[in-house]
Amino acid sequence: MAAIFVEILVRAPMEELWTHIQKPDLHERWDLRFSEIEYLPKEHEAAPQRFRYITRIGFGLEVSGEGESVGETNLEDGSRSSALKFSSRDRAPSFGKPSHGSARSSPVARAGSTPT
């Protein structure tokens, strides 16, 4: 299956945008793949962040699974990136397959301003 690439301009400070990507209670408000996200304890600071998730499909059906995410905040061009992979053992045809996603947040300079 071909990858889907979406680009959108978000007028927000970089730190605020990054917080909405990384904090589970904020992430689940905008990412329709996840109704609930719960971080699991890390083995050490550099380890990927493991998580459990629930997706409510409707009609009382839900899918649950686990995943992990990683992020970089100090890229050379001032951008930040994060990637996640997740899967479910539930038997719903399209939900049992492993999936993944990534995001890159890049500062955009406007005339007369500094990137944020």
Image (cartoon, grey):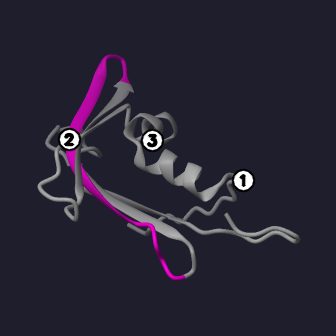
Q: Which residue is mark 3?
A: 27
Task: Look at label 3 and name its amino acid.
Answer: His
User: Could you say where residue 8 lies in the image, as x and y percent from the top left?
Assistant: 66, 59
Q: Which residue is mark 1?
A: 11
Q: Which residue is mark 2?
A: 65
User: Could you say where residue 96 lies in the image, as x and y percent from the top left?
Assistant: 21, 46
Q: Nearer the viewer, residue 8 or 105?
A: 105
- 104 displayed left or right of 38: right
Q: Secondary structure at mark 2?
A: strand
Give the residues drawn in magenta, as a range: 58-76
Label 2 – label 1 distance at C-alpha: 32 Å
Q: Nearer the viewer, mark 3 or mark 2?
A: 3
| Residue 97 in view | no
Q: Does the magenta-highlighted stretch encompass residue 70? A: yes
Vertical placement of residue 21 versus 38, above or below: below
User: Could you say where residue 7 lies in the image, as x and y percent from the top left?
Assistant: 62, 63
